[in-house]
Amino acid sequence: MGRPAVHRAGAAQPRPQRGDLGAARDGGDPRYPASQRLPDFPYASYAEMLGLTGIRLDHAGAVQSTWRKAFNATRPVVVEALVDPAVPLLAPHLPDDAARKLYRGLDQEPDGSRARERVFAQRAEEGHDDHALRS
């Protein structure tokens, strides 16, 4: 197993032109509670201590400017995004079969109704009619 590479400031490095912010979860299964709890830790501040760019995203209105800062950074970036743990992070235009599995998983969670309504609203904004998928 190799060691992580650390480059000196100013060294020529390829600049990634893509970003991902999200979490993966197998559809149809409820969340495993122990995997949902992260320690209270200042991820963005820690990134800065390591010489990276750290950005703390704490409200929805700052998403666009956060991505702009991240893509314009001259070094690797850690985005510490504070999100509502009851709301699933969804890829845009989730296929109907994946949405059906997600609804089935949320049905198994004691507090799944709130997340279910948020998923329904997001998919409706994208033009999906999930009334048949929700039953």
Image (tube, rainbow, N blue to C red):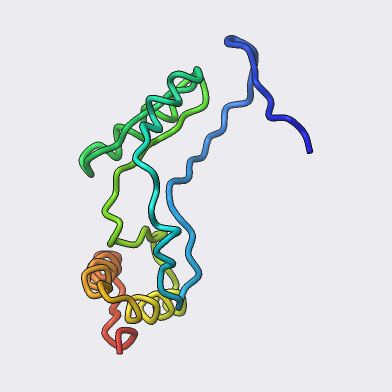
- 61 to 76, vertically: above or below: below
- 116 to 53, vertically: above or below: below
Residue 74 lies left or right of residue 131; in this view the side is right
The quadrant the C terminus occupies is: bottom left
Comparing 7 with 20, the one in front is 7
Residue at the limit of the structure toward the right, as seen here:
1
In the image, what residue occupies the spot 35% across and 80% down?
108
Name the spot of residue 57 as percent of width and height, x first.
Answer: 29, 36
Quarter of the image for residue 119 reads: bottom left
In the image, what residue occupies the spot 37% across and 58% down?
89
In the image, what residue occupies the spot 65% across and 21% down?
6
In the image, what residue occupies the spot 30% across and 80% down?
130
Residue 34 lies left or right of residue 81; in this view the side is right
The quadrant the N terminus occupies is: top right
Name the spot of residue 15 as percent of width and height, x first.
Answer: 57, 27
Comparing 111 with 104, the one in front is 111
Name the spot of residue 82 as percent of width and height, x first.
Answer: 30, 43
Comparing 58 with 38, the one in front is 38
Name the spot of residue 106 as percent of width and height, x first.
Answer: 34, 75
Residue at the limit of the structure toward the top, as seen here:
10
Quarter of the image for residue 3 reads: top right
- 44 to 18, vertically: above or below: above
- 19 to 130, vertically: above or below: above
Count of numbered tags: 0
